[in-house]
Image: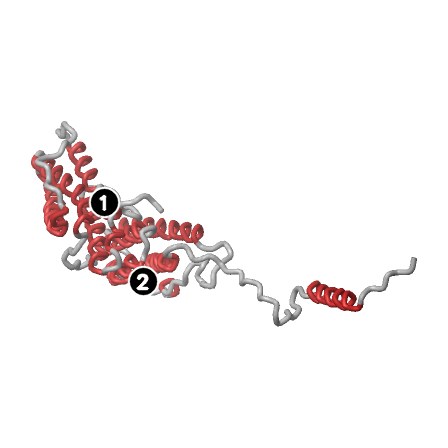
Amino acid sequence: MPPVPVPRRTALRAAAWAGAAAMLSGCSGDRLRTPWAPEPPAQESGPDAPDLPLIRAARHRVAGYRSALAQVEPTSEQRALVRRLDELWTLQAERLELLLTALERPSGSDDPAVGTSPPDDAATSSAPSDLLTLGRTVRADREVMVEEIGASTATNRPMLLSLAAQQLFSADRAGAPVDWPALSGPTGAAAVPILATARPAVYALEVVAARSGGEEREAYEAVLAPLRGMTRTLTTLAGDAAPVPPLGYDLPEPLASRSDREGLARAVVADIAPAVLRVADRAGSDPAQVGSTLRLTVEATAWSRRLGAGTTAFPGMTLP
């Protein structure tokens, strides 16, 4: 049977499809794309984890403090403090490095600081310094710390606040205390959780001071006076949100021994800094509000130290 002739229109259509298929199969790799072919979507990297630039800046700052501390020639009375600061700042640097390793994108970043230790200007200088100069250097960073804390999210704000508080407390111990402005926050309901820890602390310190004498009593009263002032200020700042304080609080009895009294005093004061950290995000980005939360954390840390508690790299919180 003779073959059936293929219509001319059908042949032309088949040739066109064959040519198109050949062109499409050849378009790969670096070959030029046809003008009507859509560009493939760009492979976008995910957004940075919250506060990455702020955490990197904190790491850079503590690295600079450690480098400067290595140049200090302490007096015999300062050697123990220098060793302790080195331990604290080393732990801070290690924790920040671990945190950054966990947060930074696995595929890397355009930021040259990712995964590397920041350069330390102080490390290149062999000129020795003194502890007071270092304390003043740390103190001078307070405004930068406040700005960075105010720019942080609620996820990392407690950590950045605690980190800055320890560093400013270290400046105080080095002989460069901060001249804080008057407290302006927290206000309203944000002040209530702090009052809930400050009021029992005042009551407990009054009791243990009344049952002690000599140097022991002086230690309690040295904390009690500023704690009372802070509590009165927070009550005013809380306004109508402040609950009426109870007539008293249950305390563990007996408090006949010095160790029992000191243990109680340390425990009630140790509750203040965590309470501040819990409401720190309510300060927003206002420098005065953020500065007040930082001041409260520093002062609570100093009070705990005055009562014999050890200093920690991140006061008021567990290690990040």
Residue at left offset 12%, top offset 50% = 239
**Which circle marks residue 128 in the picture?**
2
For the question of whether residue 89 can be seen, the reply is yes
In the image, farthest residue toward the bottom: 35
In the image, farthest residue toward the right: 1
Residue at left offset 25%, top offset 62% = 143
In the image, farthest residue toward the top: 254
> How far apart, in angstroms, are the residues tagged by discs 1 and 2?
40 Å
For the question of whether residue 134 can be seen, the reply is no
Provide the secondary structure element on which disc 2 rests.
loop
Residue 292 location (% of width, % of height)? 20, 55
Q: Is residue 218 above or below residue 252?
A: below
Residue 163 location (% of width, % of height)? 30, 52
Provide the secondary structure element on which disc 1 rests.
helix
Q: Is residue 42 above or below residue 320?
A: below
Left or right of 211, for residue 276: right
Q: Residues within 10 Å of mark 1 (few under 14, many from 20)?
A: many
Residue nearer the viewer, 85 or 77: 85
Residue at left offset 91%, top offset 60% = 2
Q: Residues within 10 Å of mark 2 (few under 14, many from 20)?
A: few
Q: Is residue 255 above or below residue 2?
A: above
**Which circle marks residue 275 in the picture?**
1
Residue at left offset 77%, top offset 65% = 10
N-terminal-most mark, 1 or 2: 2
Residue 296 location (% of width, % of height)? 20, 51
**Which circle marks residue 314 in the picture?**
none
Residue nearer the viewer, 118 or 129: 118
